[in-house]
Image: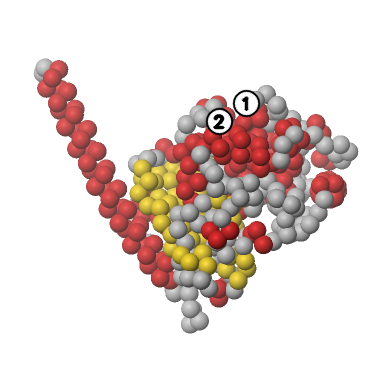
Amino acid sequence: MKKAAIAAIMTLIFYTISFAQQKNSSEITKRIETYLTEYEKAGFAGTVLVELDGKKVISKGYGFRNIELKEKNTPNTIFDIGSLTKQFTASAILKLEMQGKLTTSDTITKYFQNVPVDKSTITIHDLLRHQSGLQSDVGDDYEPISKTDFIDTLMKSSLKFKIGTDFSYSNIGYSILALIIEKVTGQTYEQYLYENLWKPSGMEETGYSRPNFDIDLIAIGYGKNNRIWGKPTDKKWNGKAPYYHLLGNGGILSTSEDMYKWHKSLMTENILSKEAKEKLYHPSIRTNENYDAIYAYGWDVSRTNRNTFRVWHNGTNNIFYADCMRFIDEKTTLILMSNKTFRGTDQLNFEMAKIIFEKNYKPTIPKPDNETN
């Protein structure tokens, strides 16, 4: 067969496959949009962004960012993203390692004085993977506390297990990482992240207070029965950032569009090198683990039944909820943000993933949010 004929056949096959993928993506998009419309009717409030085959196909707001003024959520609404903050802290640590300013094998004794013996072998790696044995918290999110008192309190706290032998989610572990970032760089946590992660990614609506947010675009948080919780920026802050119970582990404000820019940036080597990203998703693991499902560096990474990897994390303060689910191998990303306590919100991305990857899957729609239910 002549080369020209082979090329023509290959071209035809390529366009046939591409058309089938586009058609399938279009059908999936319609199914997701129908599902989200029903979810909004039931009481969901927030924003959803969906990427299929590497292309953004949905970016919409649902419900209200301000119920009293009937202001709708839009892709530009600003939310508290909770523990999605941790992926920024982890990436900043790896960026500093790339810059030769620290290593993940460093122990905390290099950065803090008077570390008690039981904590002296905790490494940055242990903190990133929640295997330090530290408690989850030593205070409430917005509880005022000085740096000295915070460090003293956590150093005096008891360990939950021998360092490096088990897993226990520790918010204060990530606050320690934020303090290390500040100590190494001589900058605030937020400023270093802006200059090295957010600005290069084009993210101008992400941070604690540096973006000088349009206050009207910050969503009001609502609890059950639409009880007003308020805006994160109305809470007690340590100047322009939260106190140390929240710094570095939560509380960053962002939009679904900015988080999508972050995802796109991580798909390149503009921020982190190929080697650093491999470490981000697949760091050294304990002897009793395998890579099928682990907590990596600020991300939960698990193997799917399609033999691909899901890179995922969520965050919540039981009012705001944020969720970022990335199927990197399959060029599919789901970003969800919500400003209202509502049943099933924490399962929404999982339901949409099933719509995408499971043929004929019928998603669960919660009962309407009313007095009867």
Q: Residue 11: x percent and y percent?
A: 18, 29
Q: Residue 281: x percent and y percent?
A: 55, 36
Residue drawn 74% across the image and 52% down it = 239
Q: Residue 153: x percent and y percent?
A: 84, 50
Q: Which residue is mark 1?
A: 98
Q: Which residue is mark 2?
A: 272
Q: Secondary structure at mark 2?
A: loop
Amino acid at dot 1 = Met
Above or below, 157 relative to 188: below
User: In this rendering, would 247 be left or right of 211?
Assistant: right
Task: Categorize mark 1 by other alpha carbons within 10 Å: few (<14), some (14-19), many (20+).
Answer: some
Above or below, 300 relative to 265: below
Is residue 118 or residue 51 the one in the foreground? Answer: 51
Specify whether residue 158 is in view.
no
Task: Tell me the quadrant of the picture where the N terminus can be found.
Answer: top left
Amino acid at dot 2 = Leu
Q: Secondary structure at mark 1?
A: helix
| Image-quadrant location for residue 141 | bottom right
Residue drawn 70% across the image and 50% down it = 241
